[in-house]
């Protein structure tokens, strides 16, 4: 496991395939003997999130469901830059390699190129969907203004593998390798790059599934709870504007908390060691003082006035 005080050069020396990741995080080369933390700070990258992704990719494990330290803006920037790298550079680069390695006058060469174009189209469609739908949604969460008709689970349910055509393409190339030395070397090198791409895409998908999606779920919960609290606060204060409510007694507050927790009058009486008639009297006094007559209204009142935590209430 790499840590913030490790040298960045050591990390890259041990894992050269992380070089591209640096660019996606916005980290420039030329960091000398600086530590991971120093390098990240110089490039305005959240160190904890950078190391979480690095260690996950290298070691293949991590617990991210409850990891509140992850920076969603850092993850979003990383994924957006990764998409740009793959769509704008890597896909066209492999296409050029294939063209140079194959004799396009032969039918099998045309078939291989067609397979690649279909694969590239599928990848573009997959990533463009994320860029058009998922990433703007995440930015709206960061801004505290989430869309109401979308959530990250919608994305997660449809986030499937996109490498079926790539597997077929590799098999075709292996079977098609020509006998002459020059083209054989070129095609072998291209095949190696395709395998590297497959690994990169698998890692990219795993970062989305196991780090990004859990982080967005947590952010959704935070933003939406804040939004609910703000809305119900507005409702309560608007409803109570101009009213001269009497202060509630501690026992009346206990009754409200019990009601919000779903207790019946008898359960409240047993819980507070009072009679059912006394509970009924408290409830009448509460309704008179607050001018709130429904369990839902009392729930809102209890949340806004910090009698109960919103996370313990089923909204």
Image (cartoon, rainbow, N blue to C red):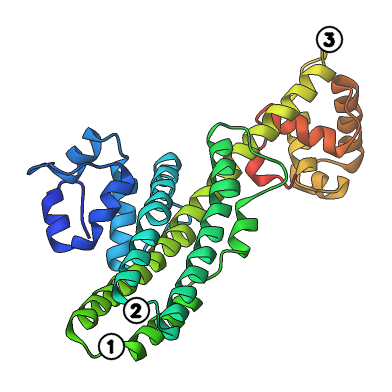
Q: Mark 2 points at which residue?
A: 103
Q: Mark 1 points at which residue?
A: 178
Q: 10 Å neighbourhood of mark 2: few (<14), some, or many (≥20)?
A: some
Taking 27 as reference, is 90 left or right?
right
Q: Quadrant of the C terminus?
A: top right
Mark 3, other Cα within 10 Å: few <14 / some 14–19 / many ≥20: few
Query: Is the residue 248 above or below the residue 166 in the image?
Result: above
Give the mark toward the camera: 1 or 3. 1
Q: Mark 3 points at which residue?
A: 244
User: Does dot 1 land on a helix, a strand or a loop?
Assistant: loop
Question: x, y (%) of residue 222?
Answer: 57, 40
Q: Distance between the residues labelled 2 and 1?
A: 10 Å
Residue 136: tell me if it is visible: yes
As measured in the structure, the alpha-carbon distance from the residue carrying label 1 to the one carrying label 3 is: 90 Å
Q: Is residue 36 left or right of residue 140?
A: left
Q: Looking at the image, do the residues carrying marks 2 and 1 touch, with CB atoms under 8 Å apart?
A: yes
Q: Is residue 232 above or below residue 56?
A: above
Tell me the residue at 62%/64% (across/down): 157
Looking at the image, which is closer to me, 148 or 295? 148
Task: Please tell me which residue is depicted at 33% across the width and 77% down the height of the picture.
Answer: 102
């Amino acid at each position: 496991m790499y840590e913030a005080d490790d040298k960045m050069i050591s990390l890259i020396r041990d894992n050269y395939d992380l070089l591209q990741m640096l660019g996606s995080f916005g980290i420039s080369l030329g960091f000398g003997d600086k530590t991971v933390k120093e390098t990240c700070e110089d490039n305005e990258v959240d160190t904890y999130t950078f190391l979480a992704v690095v260690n996950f990719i290298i070691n293949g494990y991590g617990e991210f469901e409850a990891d509140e330290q992850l920076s969603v803006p850092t993850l979003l920037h990383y994924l957006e830059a990764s998409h740009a790298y793959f769509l704008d550079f890597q896909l066209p680069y492999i296409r050029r390699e294939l063209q140079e390695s194959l004799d396009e006058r032969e039918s099998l060469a045309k078939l291989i190129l067609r397979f690649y174009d279909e694969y590239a189209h599928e990848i573009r469609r997959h990533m463009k969907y994320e860029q058009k739908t998922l990433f703007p949604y995440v930015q709206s969460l960061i801004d505290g203004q989430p869309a109401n008709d979308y959530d990250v689970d919608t994305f997660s349910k449809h986030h499937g593998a996109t490498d079926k055509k790539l597997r077929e393409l590799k098999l075709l190339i292996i079977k098609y390798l020509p006998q002459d030395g020059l083209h054989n070397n070129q095609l072998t090198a291209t095949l190696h790059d395709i395998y590297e791409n497959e690994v990169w895409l698998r890692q990219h998908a795993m970062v989305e599934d196991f780090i990004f999606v859990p982080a967005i779920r947590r952010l959704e919960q935070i933003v939406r709870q804040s939004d609910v609290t703000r809305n119900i606060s507005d409702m309560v204060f608007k409803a109570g504007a101009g009213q001269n409510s009497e202060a509630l007694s501690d026992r009346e507050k206990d009754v409200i908390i019990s009601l919000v927790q779903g207790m019946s009058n008898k359960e409240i009486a047993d819980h507070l060691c009072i009679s059912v008639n006394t509970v009924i009297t408290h409830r009448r006094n509460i309704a008179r003082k607050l001018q709130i007559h429904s369990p839902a209204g009392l729930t809102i009142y209890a949340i806004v006035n910090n009698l109960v935590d919103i996370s313990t209430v089923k909204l």
